[in-house]
């Protein structure tokens, strides 16, 4: 998969490709990440990328033309069509289902705003979708784009050493939260590992994990249960 990021801070995005699973996805040729700086397409000695808002008020607004040229350059860099996603607090909330959808694409262009945001006409003309990483306001879209890059990179086939692990994560398959995890030592001053996990009884372990997932979801995110089709066995576990 190829991701192009339009940003005033290309170094920030380059860092995403340097570490952990995202770095490995890059090394394995599963993900290529490219940054496009609208300043490189701005005119004049000062290479302006922003101006004051019409109607007055505080802050600056990103100019149409440098952004538009950067998006067009990103689009032209590869033959496959790429949707343009504007990272915005006003966008649809990002979910694991949306991440899966984006991860299945061959290409994606992420647009990062700064200041008060970008000229609305640019959004209407060039943007396919607006995506928010939560109900709070960041100073720029780069952190949000980095979140998308990370979440999408780990879903590329071969990025994780054990592909099964992603399927057991929270919000996956059945939409529940993941169960708790333990590792060595069995005995520790902070507590003991639940005995069932060392029983070797796979059916009992699976049942315990399912019960934990259901219980945690019920306690922490009951809204998720509304969207999950619970089996009769799940309902019995929840009642226990
Ligand atoms: N005036 C805008 C508003 O209230 O909707 C906020 C602009 S914000 C200071 C600057 C940029 O940060 C935005 O253009 C967007 O790209 C990015 N941004 C801020 N919060 C975000 C969020 N929750 N999710 C995604 N991007 C965000």
Image (spheres, helix red, strand yellow):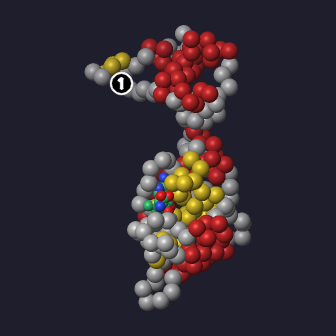
Position of the N terminus by quadrant: bottom right
Q: Is residue 21 above or below residue 47?
A: above
In this figure, which residue is indicated by the disc labeled 1? Answer: 185
Q: What residue is drawn where x is 57% and y is 53%?
A: 91
Residue 17 showing in the rendered view: no
Position of the C terminus by quadrant: top right
Residue 101 position, x and y percent, is 66, 49
Residue 60 showing in the rendered view: yes
233 relative to 204 in the view: left or right = right
Residue 179 position, x and y percent, is 50, 26
In the image as oriented, which residue stretches furthest toward the front?
55
Question: How many numbered marks are there?
Answer: 1
In the image as oriented, which residue stretches furthest toward the top?
240
13 relative to 191 in the view: left or right = right
Secondary structure beneath dot 1 equals loop
Q: What residue is drawn where x is 65% and y is 66%?
A: 124
User: Toward the viewer: 75 or 217?
Assistant: 217
Residue 166 position, x and y percent, is 57, 39
């Amino acid at each position: 998969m190829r991701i192009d990021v339009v940003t005033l801070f290309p170094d920030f995005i380059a860092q995403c490709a340097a570490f952990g699973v995202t770095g490995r996805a890059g090394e394995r040729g599963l993900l290529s990440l490219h940054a496009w700086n609208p300043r490189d397409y701005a005119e004049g000695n000062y290479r302006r990328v922003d101006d004051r808002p019409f109607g007055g008020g505080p802050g600056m607004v990103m100019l149409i033309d440098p952004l538009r040229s950067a998006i067009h350059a990103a689009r032209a860099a590869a033959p496959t069509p790429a949707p343009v996603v504007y990272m915005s607090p006003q966008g649809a909330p990002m979910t694991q289902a949306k991440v899966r959808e984006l991860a299945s694409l061959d290409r994606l262009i992420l647009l990062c705003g700064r200041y008060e945001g970008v000229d609305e006409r640019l959004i209407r003309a060039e943007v396919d979708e607006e995506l928010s990483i939560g109900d709070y306001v960041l100073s720029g879209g780069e952190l949000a784009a980095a979140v998308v890059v990370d979440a999408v990179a780990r879903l590329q086939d071969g990025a994780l050493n054990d592909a099964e692990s992603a399927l057991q994560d929270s919000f996956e398959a059945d939409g529940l939260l993941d169960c708790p995890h333990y590792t060595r030592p069995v005995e520790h001053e902070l507590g003991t590992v639940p005995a069932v996990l060392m029983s070797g009884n796979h059916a009992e372990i699976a049942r315990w994990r399912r019960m934990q997932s259901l219980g945690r979801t019920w306690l922490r995110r009951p809204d998720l249960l509304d969207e999950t089709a619970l089996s009769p066995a799940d309902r019995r576990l929840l009642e226990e």
